[in-house]
Image: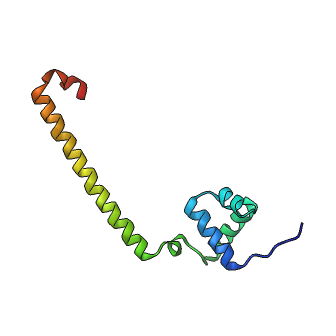
Amino acid sequence: MQRRKHSEEFKKQLVQEAMETGNKALVARRHQLSPNLIHKWMKAFQEDNDFSIEEAVSSSEVKQLEEENDRLKKLLGEKDLEIAILRDVLKKKNPHLLKRLK
């Protein structure tokens, strides 16, 4: 089997993909490489501090994720309030069901 040489950019791309998915074997299989090779590249990049997960996520993506997180927190709070209101209404109309709700 002939050895292949891979560019630094290709290695960084695969390391980033493996970090994002958290699955080295899947990335390796997709590119027909050994999972050990991906692991070796990840280790090399981490030791050299040439690559970090922060580089993979841009500031605009972080801002977008924070906005989505805030929106989802608000939605969850609204749902919790709605559930509490519905339980109160149910208690008032059907006190015998109070035991089942707890």
Q: Percent x, y for residue 83?
A: 22, 40
Tell me: 94 left or right of 17: left
The color scheme shown is rainbow
In this view, 93 is above or below 23: above
Q: Percent x, y for residue 100?
A: 24, 24
Q: Is residue 86 visible?
A: yes
In this view, 90 is above or below 8: above
Rendered residue at 62%/57% (across/down): 23
Q: Residue furthest right?
A: 1
Quadrant assignment for the N terminus: bottom right
Rendered residue at 30%/62% (across/down): 70
Q: Residue furthest top?
A: 96
Rendered residue at 39%/66% (across/down): 65
Q: Percent x, y for residue 62?
A: 41, 70
Q: How many marks?
A: 0
Rendered residue at 15%/31% (across/down): 90
Q: Is residue 102 visible?
A: no
Quadrant assignment for the C terminus: top left
Q: Quadrant of residue 4?
A: bottom right
Q: Quadrant of residue 34?
A: bottom right
Q: Percent x, y for residue 45?
A: 65, 73
